[in-house]
Amino acid sequence: MTGLVDTHCHLYDTRGADIDGVVAAARAAGVTAMIDVGCDAATTASAIAMATRFDDVYATAGLHPHEAVHGVDSIVPFLTDPHVVAIGECGLDYYYDHSPRDIQRAAFAAQIQLAHEHRLPLVVHTRDAWADTFDVLRAEGAPERLIFHCFTGGADEATACLDLGAFVSFSGIVTFKTATDVHDAARLCPLDRMLVETDSPYLAPVPHRGRTNQPAYVAHVAQFLADLRGLTTERVHVVTSENACLAFPAVRP
């Protein structure tokens, strides 16, 4: 069967599990590439170190909205590292408000501009902030390659993402019985815009819900999407892997 790309994980945080074992388990589950996502300067450096160590791991450089108070200049030095394949995750999070909202918006806008300048894909995190997220993207101009990671909206939000030319990435949340809005979005999303991810160590999919997540479990996300859409598992593996290469051109699974 065609392999899978976990387009969003945090391999520098395995919650104590041996990293070699985590990567080996992913490979055994058919995962052929993993994108290790930075959230600030320290985790970006860690992601780059992971990508240096493992040939099938790639890094991103980003400032999460929680960390926006640290300033975008803190991640700029990493953007020319050859292991960095995207900017992000960045965006807005009004659920926790760990950084003031005006600072979040400024950091988000700055990273959109960096994506334009460096011609890199942009990985977006948004929580309880859909309207402002779309407003900032429209004001700054959506990058050519735009990924909404760990999608938590419904059909309307998915349509708005697609109208911006974005890819929509589904995590373990889509496997939750109560995530009916996300199910609607997954039914609506064209196959050529669909990605899969774990966001590990968070949000483990059914049947591992409540446990520490890991990239191997992205296979459960793909299986759920196949069942939801009435597709073969192989078809979902093929299209999401192809889409990952389009969304992140430097990734070669």
Image: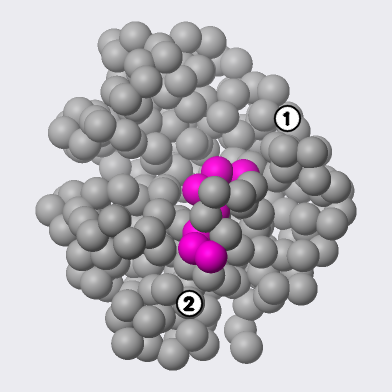
Residue at coordinates 48% horizontally, 77% vertically from top-left?
A: 223
- Magenta residues, start to end: 201-207
Q: In this view, does 138 lie to the left or right of 170?
A: left
Tell me residue 125's x, y (percent).
39, 37
Q: Is residue 37 visible?
A: yes
Residue at coordinates 40% horizontally, 63% vertically from top-left?
A: 175
- Callout 2 crowding tier (Cα within 10 Å): few <14, some 14–19, many ≥20: some
Q: In this view, does 41 lie to the left or right of 111?
A: right
Q: Is residue 199 visible?
A: no
| Mark with earlier residue (2, 1) | 1
Which kind of residue does numbered mark 1 sit on?
A: Ala
Q: Where's the C terminus, which quadrant?
A: bottom right
Which image quarter: residue 137? Answer: top left
Q: In this view, does 121 lie to the left or right of 138?
A: right
Residue at coordinates 42% horizontally, 48% vertically from top-left?
A: 149
Disc number at residue 159?
A: none
Disc number at residue 45?
A: 1
Q: Mark 2 points at which residue?
A: 223
Which image quarter: residue 132? Answer: top left
Q: Give the secondary structure at mark 1.
A: helix
In this rendering, the answer to whether 110 lies above or below 165 is above
